[in-house]
């Protein structure tokens, strides 16, 4: 049983985290062996978990054309909507079952075990499966897949300081472990973000653009710079003031989960209650880019359409 | 001029981030050379910055008996209260000047350049100075120093993936770069935290213990698990339910900044207004440990005593 099993877990949830005795890099000959180990319990499903407790584990099988595997960062495609015969996407995916589980992993910040299918040189042979450690879900959104149907996507980031060198090519060539280069990129990006973030926060004097609240600290005020369209892969939003909102932490979280969206006219909708809750506050010198607000509406709000958590 | 200089900066603030052409590890023969490079502009002060904009840079000189240097994590002691002759702490430090600047670096999440004094084998020779890159301020609190007087302390964490191997011992032996060991510790800690965090959040059904708010997501609710007494060095709080509160992100931030404290009787005080704003909400099965609340009051509230940001 996993080390972190909750005492209150139902039988359809077996616990987060590492399985004792199973080290990162451990291989399993097939899904049956993998399931017996408790690393990933279902024999077929790619996601194991529940909407209530989150996802225990996922398998990256390479079956989804929209998956992206960069080693320590994975853009994973949700489940459903595929024809069982052809495995092609034939309808929209919904934020239910495994997809809802991964969303809850993000909102509860719970670690997910990641297993990769490793395909061998002979293309006809079955893959083996390798446990690649714990990841956190950093972002969840919907997109139109290559098929033209809606897919749910998840950005998973390794909780390890690094991902051990991959011995076998999997879906794509993993990013190189050229540490000095990554170092520079990371730091430069943080500093650029700080500059833009401070500009936007100061333009609003740290007041939240949704509620007007200003959190107070002994030396000033606190607000957060929320990127409307995320930086970097795969959203590729720019790090400019027009792509940033000054928000209190509560409205930042609600914006990131798609509970709040903002219209072309800057009207704010709360999708949990289905009501408009006001207009986005503006400040001289800070022009919010409407195209980025549209991107956010198009990629974050769909989860509310059939959500059991929405008011009548 | 640093790359990230704001166009609106006053002359007493020159900008965050890296100074072009100055690489991490660059050495300077003395404070005059260091100042001329713009990496750390003052000739004597250990902290360069303002309460409004935060700290540009600090020098770790080893002059403070309460500093702790672990390489990529530094517990830095604020300035003031020392006798200019003996350099001994003779009165309490206040959250003003450089100390307020470092506090603002935390609340605005702005990077701080860190310079270390490197002492050479001959104890009589003057130290040289090495630029060791950008750090973020993760935590600010007050403590009673070895002298018996109040000191301000800051936990700084390197923004680099790793700190380059130190060539010269500085204050203490830096932690080894034994990556596999650190890896296991990091992951185990995250998983343990997840288990306790989920227990507390579920005990309160994700409602904030300060305001009762429950942030809604398409698959459930969102709350944060706030550790009352921080985990790990130097606070060494335990990762148990009694040391965790279920808070909305806004009240989590305010609790961490010491704007809110909670009494033995669970009365919540807002130090920005000087008023009691209610009682901490309780839930069956979750007993908050009063000793940890006392630790939080004793280490986070003092900044409000002379704050210009407090209401009359």
Image (cartoon, coloured by chain):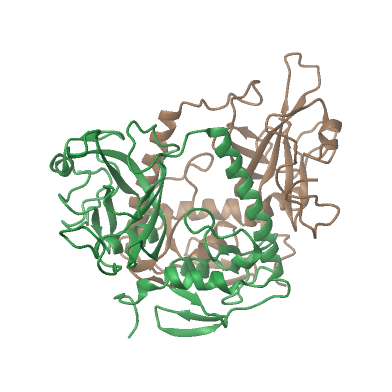
Chain colours: A brown, B green
A157 in relation to B142, above or below = above
Q: Which residue does the image show at 63% across and 42% down from the upper left?
A: A135
Q: Residue furthest top?
A: A122
Residue A103 screen position, x and y as percent: 67, 52
Residue A101 screen position, x and y as percent: 73, 51
Residue B87 screen position, x and y as percent: 21, 57
Q: Quadrant of residue B70?
A: top left
Horizontal side of residue A231 vs A274, given as left or right: left
The quarter of the picture where the N terminus of chain A appears is top right
Q: Quadrant of residue A120?
A: top right
Q: Which residue does the image show at 28% across and 39% down from the upper left?
A: B131
Is residue A169 visible in the rendered structure shown here?
A: yes
B201 in relation to B38, above or below = below
Horizontal side of residue B289 vs B308, given as left or right: right
The quarter of the picture where the C terminus of chain A appears is bottom right
Pick the residue in front: A206 or A215: A215
Is residue A156 visible in the rendered structure shown here?
A: no
Residue A70 screen position, x and y as percent: 58, 32
Pick the residue in front: A145 or A223: A223
Q: Which residue does the image show at 54% across and 66% down from the upper left?
A: B228
Horizontal side of residue B10 vs B271, given as left or right: left
The number of numbered badges drawn on the structure is 0
Pick the residue in front: A158 or B31: B31
B27 in relation to A309, above or below = above
Q: Which residue does the image show at 81% across and 31% down from the upper left?
A: A86
């Amino acid at each position: 049983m996993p080390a972190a099993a909750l005492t209150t877990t139902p039988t359809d949830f077996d616990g987060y985290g590492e399985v004792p005795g199973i080290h990162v890099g451990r291989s399993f000959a097939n899904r049956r062996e993998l399931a017996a180990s408790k690393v990933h319990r279902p024999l077929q499903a790619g996601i194991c978990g529940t909407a209530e407790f989150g996802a225990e584990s996922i398998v990256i099988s390479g079956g989804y054309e929209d998956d992206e595997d960069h080693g320590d960062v994975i853009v994973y495609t949700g489940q459903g909507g595929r024809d069982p015969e052809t495995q092609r996407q034939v309808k929209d995916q919904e934020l239910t079952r495994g997809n809802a589980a991964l969303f809850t992993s993000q909102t509860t910040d719970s670690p997910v075990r990641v297993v990769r299918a490793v395909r061998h040189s002979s293309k006809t042979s079955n893959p083996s499966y390798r446990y690649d450690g714990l990841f956190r879900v950093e972002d969840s959104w919907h997109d139109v897949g290559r098929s033209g149907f809606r897919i749910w996507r998840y950005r998973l980031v390794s909780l390890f300081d690094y991902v051990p060198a991959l011995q076998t090519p999997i879906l794509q060539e993993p990013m190189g472990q050229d540490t000095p280069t990554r170092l520079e990129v990371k730091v430069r990006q943080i500093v650029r973000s700080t500059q833009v973030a401070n500009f936007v926060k100061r333009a609003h004097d740290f007041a939240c653009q949704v509620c007007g609240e200003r959190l107070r600290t002994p030396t000033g005020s606190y607000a957060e710079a929320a990127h409307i369209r995320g930086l970097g892969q795969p959203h590729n939003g720019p790090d400019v003031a027009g792509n940033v909102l000054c928000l209190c932490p509560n409205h930042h979280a609600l914006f990131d989960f798609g509970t709040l969206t903002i219209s072309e006219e800057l009207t704010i909708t709360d999708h949990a209650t289905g009501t408009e809750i006001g207009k986005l506050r503006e400040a001289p010198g800070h022009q919010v880019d409407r195209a980025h607000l549209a991107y956010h509406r198009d990629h974050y709000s769909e989860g509310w359409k059939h959500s059991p958590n929405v008011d009548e």
